Amino acid sequence: MNKIILLILLSSSQITWAAQEIEDSVVKVFAAKQSHNYNEPWKSNGIRRSFATGFIIDDNRILTNAHAVSNARYIQIRFGNNPNKHDVELEYISDDFDLAVLKFKDKDDIPKVKPLKFSESLKLKEGVIVYGYPMGGDKLSITEGIISRIQLHKYAFSQKEYTTIQTDAAINPGNSGGPVLLDGKVVGIAFQGVRSASNIGYMIPSHIVKHFLNDIKDKSYDGIPTLGFDWMSLESSIHRKMLGMKDDETGILIKEVNKYSSMIDILKKNDVILKIEDYIVGIDGSIQFNSNARIGLSYILEKKEFGESITIKFLRDGKRQTQTVTLEKPSKNAVVDVYNSNIPPSFYMTSGFVFQKLSINYINQYQVLYRNPAYDLVKLIDDHPEDIDEIIFIVSVLPDSSNEGYQNLRNIAIKEINGETIKNFEDFINKLKSKRYAVLKDMEDNEIVIDNNLSQQRDEKIKKLYNISQLYSDDLIPPESAKSL
């Protein structure tokens, strides 16, 4: 009997010690942030102070969320058992996965704490513990819950879909970046919740975190490969029969292969994807990823890095083929770049017209600013001419005598100037200034006319009137002043 009691006491002591080690590794993150203003691209937004959570990983680095430290001008962290703050700086950031790594500015400033370890062992209904510094208090908060769902879900920061883990543990503002643990190991990172619902929180699964940490080992961040094609489901049995599929076969139909994709020389429109690696593709594009759950196709890529290969089985013209594809990093981004919170907007102004290169950054900020999905902007991406590299559009027009009649224009994409198509921003500026009258045509063939002689007279006055620091972004070479034509 005494031996049994002693064993219980020892076990309890070990649990308490392990819990203390975890608490010692969790930090509060303080950031002073100044984001870029894509609506008025010549200026930055005001300073905003925020706090979040992070934790110590290998090499005395700190892992947290990207949205907690993006555009941060100054970052500090504080350990829960110590009132002193430590200066840190951003080392790596992944906007896609909402992850960031911080490092101490002063190596002598690093406390001796054990880094937390990761585990991918996770099942539905398992209990987890969330550590963090949510609003409403300054001390470490510890909440418990169960895993209620594993699925693809949109990451609010990047607007991309990756695997998320849903839990009913309390996750509130300030919890972002905090570790979610099972059996003493990190199985996820708290990062977002649902405002209109209670007890619904999401975490980034550890396999995505580990992918990010492996990716940056070569001191650069590449991200996760994409499948590189658009597809539609094949829920119609008639459609499947018409394509030559067997009764027991499932799969999805390719609508388009992206021109910069690794798949461009392998797959074609109207191919039916039957299997990727060892995963049979369902008629809805899902795969069986464990014994009792299905998930979207992109889960396969979350465990792949550029340079690795995948095997694809597909049906083409009634014949089944199997090809191995090396996942190469695209030589060029798609017409709209991936989200990058630290990249300032590319813009050019003349006659009060504010031109900008369409980016996911702009679309995201537009949706937040106007609380309205940017359907018109997304439509620009879908409907743009195939032979252009960048979409140039009118963000807004600053009212002036030189733009009378056009002052209410907003989010208007330009497809050509004086009858010539536009390839990219540099091409746009050159053609804009090539003649006295620049006749711009939008995607619906409406015309906008700019008088370059009048622009010469008005640009500096508009700049002073609206307190604008410069008429073009730093990444654009200022064009030569247009001569009178």
Image (tube, rainbow, N blue to C red):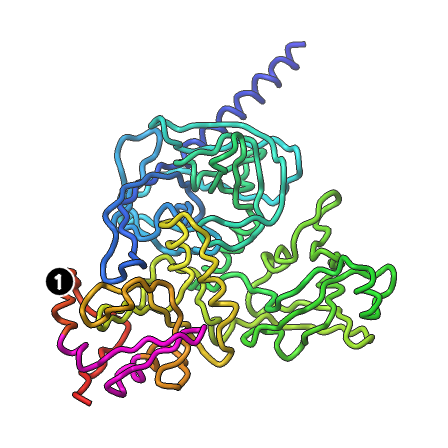
User: In the image, which residues are magenta?
Assistant: 429-457
Q: Residue sitting at 65 percent across and 73 percent down?
A: 325
Q: Where is residue 182 in the image (x, y as percent from the top left)?
A: 57, 35
Q: Position of residue 442 (x, y in %)?
A: 40, 74
The amino acid type found where label 1 is placed reads: Leu
- Of residues 47 and 374, the one drawn nearer to the viewer in this rendering: 374
Residue 103 seen in the figure: yes
Q: How crowded is mark 1: few (under 14 residues within 10 Å), some or many (20 or more)?
A: few
Q: In this view, does 303 lie to the left or right of 289?
A: left
Residue farthest along the right direction in this orientation: 247
Location of residue 363 with respect to 132 vertically, above or below: below
Q: Is residue 432 magenta?
A: yes
Residue farthest along the top direction in this orientation: 1
Residue 108 seen in the figure: no
Q: Label 1: which residue? A: 465
Q: Is residue 476 left or right of residue 189?
A: left
Q: Residue sitting at 75 percent across and 44 percent down?
A: 291
Q: In which quarter of the image is the N terminus?
A: top right
Q: Residue sitting at 37 percent across and 69 percent down?
A: 393
- Of residues 441 and 413, the one drawn nearer to the viewer in this rendering: 441
- Of residues 274 and 434, the one drawn nearer to the viewer in this rendering: 434
Location of residue 105 with respect to 335 vertically, above or below: above
Instruction: Name the element at disc 1.
Output: helix
Q: Where is residue 344 in the image (x, y as percent from the top left)?
A: 31, 62
Q: Does the magenta stretch include residue 380?
A: no
Number of numbered discs present?
1
Q: Position of residue 122 (x, y in %)?
A: 63, 40
Q: Residue sitting at 49 percent across and 81 percent down?
A: 387
Residue farthest along the bottom direction in this orientation: 485
